[in-house]
Image (cartoon, rainbow, N blue to C red):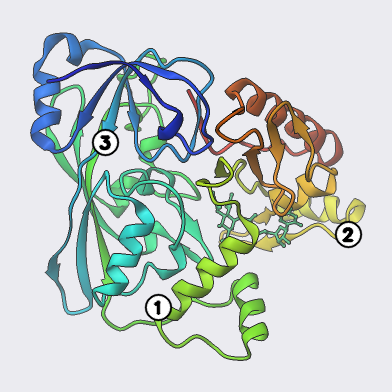
Amino acid sequence: MLVEKNVPLQSYNTFGIVAKALSLVRLTNEADVNAMLNDPALKAAPKFILGGGSNIVITGDVKPLVLKIEIMGKRLVSETAKAFVVEAGAGENWHELVAWTLDNGFPGLENLAMIPGSVGASPVQNIGAYGVELQDRFESLDAIDLQTGQTFTLNAAQCAFGYRDSVFKHASSSATDGGPGFGLAGRALITRVRFALPKVWKPVLGYADLDRKIAQMGEVPTTPQQIFEWICAIRRAKLPDPAVIGNAGSFFKNPTVSVEQCADIIEREPKIVHYRMDDGSVKLAAGWLIDACGWKGKSVGNAAVYDRQALVLVNKGGSQNPVTGGEVMTLAKAIQTSVYERFGILLEPEPVVV
Ligand code: EPU
């Protein structure tokens, strides 16, 4: 097994931060994972799993062994009465999978078009956009236990999906950072993910941006392809393309508060954007909170708040003069402080800080 040394990571993270992996292995299939785990030195090394690099902030050279997931493949594996079951390798690009499913007549992922990142990272984050979350289309996944080398399969319930959350984000009881926990963070390496895509397709509309697009176009979309194209257009208009301006998507989660807390905030801030959730809680738009504190366009070094969506932090120095992880985190902390001081709400960052 080839262990590469001092590998530049700038093109492996969507912020475009410059850093090195002190050692890195590329895993292209399950046999590579097993070979790595059969090497006593590699098995014992602390590890960092790198997918599409679209949800990380790198704050220095990465010392743990970087596992670069390059497991590919997209195929229809089975059909039930209600669904096509499509499987994709963890290393596949998410957006390319969405486009491929639509080209092959398997609808259902169109609202999730253009989300940066890899297939393997999609269940970790339970990615979501425009009224659809990964958990709505998830069938099962295969993973390998990095401690025992065993392969296992998890269904949706076992993944414990929540808003931008899953079992893969929580510490395991054997984690060195002090469990006890029932999670699989740092322990499960996701190899393949299967999606159940509905044979009887219904569009998921009703999200504010989509409704605006319907009004603007003067028609309701009738095919998955049309929704796909509209979502791509909506995202291009308000979110920066990481290939042009480095970023990691939404930098903070949308916070939830109780009805009472929300009523209290509304009294002081009548314009606050909020949504009632099914469980009775209220979700606040973090982008609105940050915007209301006047952060749009502000920067720390080369880390800036995107001027069209305050929830997105960007690398304004490009690849020539790139942002550092330290600048991103300093800006993020300043935003957290000002939102906390005005609204009493602590924003929780989405990306993993390495
Ligand atoms: N808003 C502002 N100012 C801003 C940004 C937003 O006032 O600078 C307001 C908007 O006007 C809107 C509300 O905040 O009323 C919500 O904004 P938006 O519809 O853009 O969605 P979001 O809550 O900011 C979430 C996801 C995105 C996903 C979109 C669309 C999170 C953390 N983010 O953003 O996901 O694409 O909804 O469904 O849940 C990601 O996670 O990386 C991501 C891009």
Q: Secondary structure at mark 1?
A: helix
Residue wearing tag 2: 270
Marking on residue 69: 3
Compared to residue 87, the image places residue 177 above or below, namely above
Q: CA distance from mark 3 to mark 1?
A: 29 Å
Between marks 1 and 2, how big is the CA–CA gap? 38 Å
Q: Is residue 343 left or right of residue 159?
A: right
Q: Secondary structure at mark 3?
A: strand
Q: Is residue 202 above or below residue 151?
A: below
Residue 147 image-quadrant placement: top left
- Foreground pick, 290 / 347: 290
**Residue drawn 62% across and 59% down?**
280
The image quadrant where one finds ligand 1 is bottom right
Q: Nearer the viewer, mark 2 or mark 3?
A: 3
Q: Amino acid at mark 1?
A: Gln
Q: Position of residue 164 (x, y in %)?
A: 49, 47
For mark 2, give the secondary structure: loop
